[in-house]
Image (cartoon, rainbow, N blue to C red):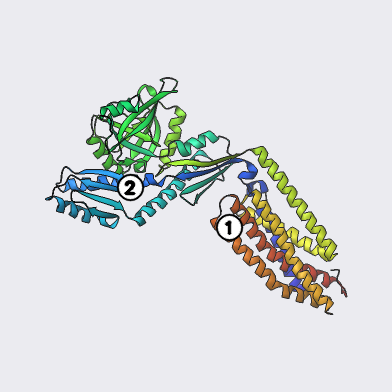
Amino acid sequence: MKGSLMWRGMLILASVLLAVALLYPPSKKIILGLDLRGGMHLVLQVHTEDALRAETDSDMATLIQRAEDEGMSGLKGQRVGDDRFQIAGYTPESHDTLSTVISKQRYDQRWDISDQGNAMIFKLKAAEANQIRDSAVTQAKQTIENRIDAFGVAEMTVQSADNHRIVIQLPGLDDQDRVRRLIKNTAFLEFRIVEYPRGATGAPTKDDILKNFNGRLPDNLEILEGDVREKGTNAVVGKQYFAVEKRRTVTGRDLSNARPSSGEFNRPIVQFMLKPQGSVAFAELTGKNIGKGLAIVLDGRVVTAPVIHARISDSGIIEGDFTQQEVQDLSTVLKSGALPAGITYLEERTVGPALGRDSIQKGLLAAVVGTALVMVTMLIIYNLSGVNAIMALLLNVLILFGGMGMFHSTLTLPGIAGIILTIGMAVDANVLVFERVREELRAGRTVRSAIDLGFDRAFTSIIDTHVTTMVSALFLFQFGTGAIKGFAVTLFIGLLASIFTAVFVSHWIFDLVLSRRRMKALSI
């Protein structure tokens, strides 16, 4: 018996020391969440239709190019929806050649193709469209993580949510405007050919563009807006408009690197490099459109539209009356990865540090008051045996915080609620044991026999209640976001510790007392 008490006591002591070591120093081991530390909470909507359009335009341009490589000419492609395009301009004699190209490139595996006689309609298969949408959200999530990480925000949380949304939590953030710009303002980069007007300066109104096309814009064009900035101050002084091709042959996905640089008159610019596949497409695009404008479109707005003077292959520059800070941020965004689709803010909440401190104070007050009431209740109901439950409870809380320190968990306001719930569950386990011991004493058992039988018979109920709640906590952690995960983490670790303290530690304390003296009655 003494040997058993010795190794069990050493195990409990080792658990205490390990928990303290894992927890110390608590300020570095346990991270305060957004609701306690202050910061930003964002919910973003990913416009997955942008990714579909880019994929549609890319496949359409590739098909036309492959057909031209086979000797066909005069083909005309037009996107007629987010996930569909049509090819026209072929003759009955060249129809078979086009069909051979389609088969060779395996377009029929990705697209549902209907032959209208004078045109072929390509519609993206549903499974492919869903895969592109999901991939766009995943890529957007990773890109945003890279951007924020480059900015230097610690303990960030970026998670995917339903309906192609992304939830972002940035605790302790102080420069919120710059983070907004990094995430959103340069979301989606595209290179488009400008059909009107010629030159880097746009038309003053949309009507001026429509007049050039006799009042009706061709189906393959759309009008995009850009800012007119005052030289020197870089202040926005007006708007200008460009008629650009809808086709997106080259996008930010084709970039391999970007860095700040200096252009004419030492003006800040962004120099970019393209991936091999992007270089081929960019050379094709610029080589066929020498003399036209190349609109550099960021998030649906024209930043600049320089005239193409020569074929451009693997590199280029972006200039647009930027400040040095804007060039640095734009380079960071492009280098960390271009978003595959545009995004908009659905929700934005800012939690100030003062509100966070108030939450901490009230949360700790609730925890202290709740724990104190539990302790007093145990002493009133179970007399001196309540001290056993209190010691097990204190060790439970210590192990809980040690576990959080080991995983560098984030403590949130719901996490504090999880701790309080854990305290209630831990005490409930002691109550199950003590009531069983009472029943055995009333049945005439000796103190030692009553204690052993009480723990044995309550064990199944304790395991049942704790394991089912732990499974619920795992589901909350898997499918929850932000603060919900904080609640799940504290609840799971606390319940795991509760099984150890309520059964193993509490039983050891009783055995330790009984080994010191013979007892005919138990204060319970």
Mark 2 or mark 1: name the one nearer the start of the chain: 2
Query: Type of residue at label 2?
Result: Glu
Q: Is residue 497 above or below residue 63?
A: below
Q: Is mark 1 on a helix, strand or loop?
A: helix
**Disc ID at residue 353:** none
**Disc ID at residue 476:** 1
The percent position of residue 56, horizontal first and vertical second, equals 31, 47
Q: Residue at x 61, y 44 (%)?
A: 34
Query: Type of residue at label 1?
Result: Leu
Quarter holding the N terminus?
Answer: bottom right
Residue beneath disc 2 = 55
Residue 12 appears anywhere in the view: yes
503 or 458: nearer the eye? 458
Left or right: where 433 falls relative to 406: right
Binning the other alpha carbons within 10 Å of mark 2 as few (below 14), some (14 to 19) or many (20 upward) gives: many
Residue 398 appears anywhere in the view: no
